[in-house]
Structures are given as structure tokens and as C-alpha cells.
Image: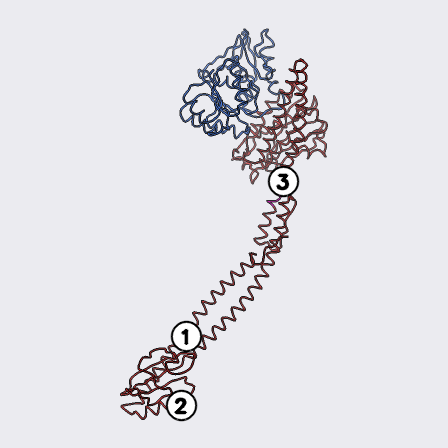
Chain colours: A red, B blue
């Protein structure tokens, strides 16, 4: 089993991405909330300062400096921990009342550091300064609450981030594990396939999700790949088996010719034999290539609406004399009308020709062959039957294979590719091909489905 | 005949050109598409023989270019690709005939001869005549030495094709294509059967044979010399 590392697993990455996105969203939301609250607090501080200043101005009245001094002293006493700061000075800078020592000049405005007011603290102050009569008043409130807010928010955010990270890490690992198990199954399957085992099927879960769909598609790709590899393997086997022996015969003939030539004997018969043998090899090779070409399905581009009755009439007429000369009877049984099928006229002609030639070659003199077309349950059915010796049940599947020939037919001419070609052509047309017992004899049935799929036309208008 | 063979397989080119030379024809050989295109448009030939797979300019493109230049010299394709699609492609590109490798020289010679004579067919004859055999295309009637012969529709076409090619060999596949429009290779002697039927009607009852079998090649209809 080949595992990817945790960080590279897509499940984990997904969880981490979501975690990061969530963090960013939380930071934005927190920052917004913080700045809104902070602004509110700042406004409140400024309002309080303004109100206090106005109150002290009214305490001064028209010039009651003693009242103002006493009021400030009172306020100062109440604010011992210096939440609020008061300082009343005359214009010379001399302190008259307040809870801080002298503040230099009138430089402070808005927010100021605690040190500027001579206080030791790590937070800032909101400051308001102004003249009251002949005096100068400085008041300030500490911004400690804002500093506290900042601290609380930061701490809260830090904890939230930690918890979030922990949860998403755990979740990510869980997701990664379960994804990894499923991906590992697919990897294992594909590894077996690349090792050449095309019978492998990757197990799917019961979830029916996208990964299952993907797995199903992979399985069907594997099975089709397997079928085509099997086809290739078979054809190369066939070629090596069935082309090797004629090649060996050809070689012997040529050697014989060379020998005869050396002895001064005429080599004409050997050369003629070699030519004939070469022609047979070429014919076999052509047929194999033709089947391969048909099986690729490229010819579907040339499909057109075809009247099968015309095809049958033409080709049976073509072979009629051959059957007569062989002492056989060929009967053609056609309906007056049949829906057209979508197909390749040349290939359909070849299909019927191959079936007729098979009958011609393998049936004894006196045999009766029937070629018929019929419409059966939404299918155009082509039947070629004979009352010859037929094909034994156990050999019926095998005869559709390339180059397979019945044991007893080894001595009759033919490449053994006729029925393979018929099969390839009927497959291309989406038709089903079956070999049936005609009791006695063989009945070949090709069913071209009409309408839905299979490349057949929708019928007569 | 003056022929131009454009084929890059030196051995095959030599075999073909030697064959034509021995038969008394002149056969120029080129081994690539560019030279072929140049030569075919510059000189006048009776038939062009073109391999489909050529180095440089491939055969199909070369023929398209030759035809685009208005050159109508009869042309036959040689190919190792034997599919029907390829045949149709070749004919659509402007080829007049098509022969799949490996082939017998006699088959190529028969086809080239047929192509070279093709323009002569344009003059529309209504009665074909070979020795004492007459075929009337209008009245659909065949007579020999004044005696009427009854032929099946396909037999009539078969005879017509043979008579039009009087004195020349027609191969089995040529007959299959021209009479029946079939492009497959029957594994049985079905063409021979049709020929022997025809022969029994036009030759057997008479003392001089006109329809001859050319060994391992095909058939020809000849007046006796």
C-alpha cells in the first residue's frame, strides 16, 4: 500500500483550508466588533470630560475661585486611584488644586500617555484643557477600560484560535484518514491494473458520492481496457499460431525450389505453390486487419439509412449460381417492406456474403440454404440457415473467435475469419449475433434493433 | 504508354517499372511527393501510379495538388492500407482507381491499361461488337452470328464490361467492382461461376471461343486472330 503523507492528503488540506478561511473570517469579525466598541468608549470618555468641564465652569460661576478649588479638591479626593485627573493652575503655572503635579503648558489634547500627566501607568488618558476666568484647568480620564477591552478581546481571540485549530486539525486528520482509506483502495486497484491484472474491480462505498461515481467509471474503464488488451493478446496469439504454419510451409516450398534449382530441375511448380501460399497469408492478414479496423468503430462515421432488402437481394442474386453449381438450393425469403436500418451497406453486404460463403463451403451437396429477413419485436432480423451438419453446441462460442476453425473443417479452404468478421460487423451495428440449431443444420441470426440505441433507424414514416 | 510511378519502396518501384518496360511501355520512377508533383504537372503522361505513403509530400496531398492544377491524367493509388475508408478518401482526393499492396503485377497492369483507355469510352456507342458477337445497349439485346442470346440482367452487364474492354484483361476484383459494385474479396470462386455461365451462353454453342481465361489473372474477350 502506498500512503501519501498527512499534509499532502487532500482531506487534510481541505480541512486546513477551511480552518484558515474561518480564522480570517473570525479576525475580520473580531476587529470590526472591537473597533465599534472602542469608538463608543472613546465617545463616552469625551462626553464625560465635556460634561465635567462644564460642571467645573459653572462651579467657578462669575469668579468664585474658592468654590472651584474646593470642588476640584473634592473630586480629586474621590478619585484616589487616578481614574480621573484634575489640575487647576493660574496663568503663571502655579498649581491651585488637583491630584497631579504640574503639567507643562497647554500642549495636551485628545489622548495622552500617562507619563505626560506625571502618572506611572501603562494606559493612556483622555485630556481636556481650557481656561476658566483667570485660571487654567486640565482634566483627564484614564483609558484603562479601553486597554482592558483590548486585552480581553486579544485573549479571547487567542483562545478561540487555539480551540479552532485543535478542532480543525482533529477533523482534518479524521477526514484525511477516511479519504486516505478510500484513495488507498483506488490506488491499490490501479496498481494491480498496471501490473496487468484487469480482473481487478475497485470496491465502492455505500455512500454513492462523487468518489463512488469516479470509482464506477474507473471500473468500467478497467473492464474495457481489459477486454481490448485481451483482444490484442488473442490476435497476436492467433497470428503466431495460424500464420506461422503457412509461413513454415512457404519456407519449405522455397527451400525445395532452391534444392531443385541446384539439381537443374524446373522450379515452376514450387514457385506457383509459393505464390498461392503467399496469397493465402495475405488474405488472412487482410481479414485480420479488416476486423481490427471494424472493431475500432471508425466506420460508424459512414453509417447511413440502408434498406437491408436491397442488400440481401443483390448478394443472394450474386451467389445464386454458385449454390446451383454446388448442387445446393438457396431460397430467399423477404417481406415486401421493412424499416431501414442505419448501417454501412458495404459491411452489411460483406456480412451476408460471409454467411453465404460459409454455407457454400461447409454444407454437403443437396443442402438447402434459406436467407430470410423479418421484423420481430422492434428488430430487423436477418437469418441464414442451412440443413447441413451444423456446429456442435460446445464449439458455437469458439467459432466467433478469430482464426478458429472446427476440427473437421481444417481441410476445407478458408481463413477461419469469416464468422469473426460477421461478429465484428454485427457488433459495430449494435446487432446481436447468435448461432442456433436449425435441427438439423446451423441457423445464424442477426438482430438489428430498431429505434433506441444500436444504430438502427426509427422506422418507416 | 508513358507512365509515371511515384513510389519510395525501391524494390517495388523497380519490379513495377521493369514489368511495364518489358511490356513495351515507358515508366518514369520518382521516390517522393515534391518531385512527383513537379514532374506530373510538367510532363504529359498516360497514367500516374502513386503510392499513398510518400516521404515529404504524402500521396493524397500530392494528388489533390495535381488535380487542383487542372491536370486530369488518370491516376491509380497504391497503398498498404486496405480499409474502405482509405479507398473512398483516395477516390475523393482525385484518384481514379485504387490497388492494395501487396498486389500481383498483372492486376496493376490490367488496371493501368483500363485507365489509359478510359477517355476513349466517352464516345457513346450504342452497339458493341466483337467478332460476330453484338450487344445492343438500346434494345438490350445480344446476338452472335445473328442468333439471339438470352442473358440475365447481371450477365448482360458482365458482357458489356468485358466487351468494352475488348482485348484487355479484366481481373476478378475489377469485374467485382464494375459489374456488382462489390469491394470485398470472395473466398469462393463466385466470379468464375458467373463467367462460366456467360461462357456457356455466348461461346459454347459456337465454334470460336471469344471469352478467354487469363491464367492467375482474369478474363478477356478477344476476337480470334
Side of B114 relative to A241 (left or right):
left
Relative to the observer, which residue lies in front, B142 or A169?
A169
Is A130 within the magenta? no
According to the image, label 1 marks what residue? A38
User: Mark 1 packing: few (<14 Cα in 10 Å), some, or many (20+)?
Assistant: some
Instruction: Please report whichever mark, 1 or 3, sits nearer to the chain's N-terminal start.
Output: 1
Q: CA distance from mark 3 to mark 2?
A: 99 Å
According to the image, label 3 marks what residue? A227
Instruction: Please report whichever mark, 1 or 2, sits nearer to the chain's N-terminal start.
Output: 1
Quarter where residue B83 is shown: top right
| Chain where mark 2 sits | A
According to the image, label 2 marks what residue? A77
In the rendering, which numbered label is found on residue B99?
none
Q: Main secondary structure of the magenta part?
A: helix
Q: Which residues are magenta?
A: A220-229
| Chain where mark 1 sits | A
Q: Is residue A455 above or below residue A217?
A: above
Q: CA distance from mark 1 to mark 2?
A: 29 Å
Determine whether the residue tagged by mark 3 lies in a helix, strand or loop: helix
User: Mark 2 packing: few (<14 Cα in 10 Å), some, or many (20+)?
Assistant: few
Find out whether the residues at labels 1 and 3 contact each other: C-beta distance under 8 Å.
no
| Chain where mark 3 sits | A
Relative to the observer, which residue lies in front, A442 or A107?
A107
Amino acid at each position: 500500500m502506498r500512503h501519501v503523507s498527512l499534509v499532502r492528503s487532500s482531506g487534510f488540506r481541505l480541512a486546513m483550508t477551511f480552518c484558515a478561511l474561518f480564522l480570517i473570517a473570525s479576525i475580520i469579525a473580531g476587529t470590526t466588533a472591537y473597533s465599534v466598541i472602542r469608538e463608543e468608549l472613546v465617545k463616552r470618555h469625551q462626553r464625560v470630560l465635556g460634561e465635567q468641564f462644564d460642571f467645573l465652569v459653572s462651579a467657578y460661576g462669575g469668579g468664585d475661585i474658592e468654590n472651584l478649588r474646593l470642588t476640584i479638591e473634592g473630586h480629586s479626593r474621590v478619585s484616589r486611584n487616578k481614574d480621573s485627573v484634575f489640575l487647576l493652575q493660574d496663568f503663571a503655572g502655579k498649581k491651585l488644586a488637583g491630584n497631579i503635579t504640574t503639567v507643562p503648558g497647554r500642549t495636551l489634547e485628545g489622548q495622552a500617555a500617562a507619563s505626560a500627566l506625571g502618572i506611572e501607568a501603562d494606559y493612556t488618558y483622555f485630556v481636556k484643557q481650557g481656561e476658566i476666568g483667570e485660571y487654567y484647568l486640565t482634566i483627564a480620564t484614564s483609558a484603562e477600560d479601553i486597554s482592558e477591552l483590548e486585552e480581553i478581546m486579544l485573549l479571547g481571540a487567542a483562545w478561540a484560535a487555539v480551540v479552532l485549530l485543535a478542532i480543525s486539525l482533529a477533523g482534518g486528520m479524521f477526514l484525511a484518514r477516511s479519504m486516505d482509506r478510500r484513495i488507498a483502495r483506488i490506488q491499490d486497484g490501479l496498481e494491480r491494473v498496471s501490473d496487468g491484472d484487469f480482473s481487478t474491480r475497485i470496491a465502492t462505498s455505500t455512500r454513492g458520492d462523487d468518489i463512488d461515481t469516479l470509482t464506477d467509471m474507473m471500473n468500467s474503464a478497467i473492464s474495457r481496457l481489459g477486454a481490448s488488451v485481451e483482444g490484442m493478446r488473442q490476435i497476436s496469439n492467433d497470428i503466431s499460431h495460424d500464420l506461422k504454419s503457412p509461413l513454415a510451409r512457404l519456407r519449405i516450398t522455397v527451400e525445395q525450389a532452391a534444392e531443385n534449382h541446384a539439381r537443374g530441375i524446373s522450379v515452376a511448380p514450387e514457385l506457383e505453390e509459393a505464390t498461392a501460399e503467399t496469397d493465402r497469408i495475405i488474405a488472412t492478414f487482410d481479414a485480420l486487419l479488416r476486423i481490427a479496423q471494424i472493431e475500432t468503430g471508425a466506420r460508424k462515421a459512414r453509417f447511413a439509412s440502408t434498406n437491408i432488402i436491397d442488400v440481401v437481394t443483390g448478394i443472394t442474386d450474386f451467389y445464386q449460381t454458385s449454390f446451383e453449381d454446388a448442387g445446393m438450393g438457396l431460397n430467399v425469403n423477404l417481406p415486401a417492406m421493412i424499416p431501414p436500418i442505419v448501417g454501412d451497406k458495404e459491411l452489411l453486404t460483406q456480412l451476408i456474403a460471409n454467411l453465404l460463403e460459409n454455407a457454400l463451403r461447409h454444407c454437403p451437396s443437396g443442402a438447402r440454404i434459406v436467407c430470410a429477413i423479418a421484423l420481430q419485436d422492434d428488430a430487423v432480423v436477418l437469418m441464414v440457415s442451412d440443413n447441413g451438419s451444423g456446429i456442435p453446441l460446445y464449439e458455437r462460442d469458439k467459432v466467433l473467435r478469430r482464426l478458429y476453425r472446427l476440427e473437421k473443417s481444417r481441410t476445407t479452404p478458408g481463413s477461419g475469419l469469416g464468422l469473426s468478421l460477421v461478429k465484428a460487423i454485427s457488433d459495430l451495428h449494435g446487432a446481436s449475433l447468435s448461432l442456433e440449431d436449425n435441427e438439423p443444420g446451423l441457423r445464424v441470426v442477426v438482430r438489428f434493433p430498431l429505434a433506441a440505441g444500436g444504430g438502427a433507424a426509427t422506422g418507416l414514416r | 504508354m508513358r507512365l509515371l510511378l511515384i513510389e519510395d519502396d525501391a524494390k517495388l518501384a523497380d519490379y513495377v517499372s521493369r514489368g511495364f518496360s518489358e511490356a513495351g511501355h515507358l515508366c518514369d520512377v520518382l521516390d517522393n511527393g515534391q518531385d512527383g508533383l513537379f514532374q506530373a504537372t510538367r510532363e504529359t503522361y498516360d497514367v500516374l501510379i502513386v503510392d499513398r505513403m510518400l516521404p515529404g509530400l504524402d500521396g493524397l496531398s500530392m494528388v489533390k495538388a495535381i488535380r487542383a492544377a487542372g491536370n486530369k491524367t488518370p491516376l491509380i493509388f497504391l497503398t498498404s492500407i486496405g480499409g474502405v475508408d482509405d479507398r473512398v478518401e483516395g477516390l475523393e482526393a482525385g484518384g481514379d482507381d485504387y490497388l492494395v499492396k501487396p498486389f500481383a503485377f498483372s492486376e496493376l497492369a490490367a488496371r493501368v491499361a483500363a485507365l489509359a483507355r478510359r477517355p476513349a469510352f466517352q464516345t457513346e456507342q450504342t452497339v458493341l461488337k466483337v467478332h460476330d458477337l453484338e450487344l445492343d445497349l438500346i434494345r438490350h439485346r445480344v446476338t452472335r452470328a445473328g442468333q439471339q442470346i438470352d442473358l440475365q440482367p447481371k450477365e448482360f452487364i458482365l458482357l458489356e464490361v468485358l466487351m468494352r474492354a475488348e482485348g484487355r484483361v479484366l481481373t476478378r476484383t475489377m469485374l467485382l467492382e464494375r459489374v456488382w459494385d462489390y469491394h470485398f474479396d470472395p473466398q469462393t470462386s463466385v466470379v468464375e461461376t458467373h463467367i462460366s455461365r456467360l461462357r456457356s451462353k455466348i461461346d459454347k454453342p459456337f465454334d470460336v471461343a471469344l471469352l478467354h481465361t487469363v491464367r492467375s489473372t482474369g478474363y478477356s474477350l478477344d476476337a480470334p486472330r
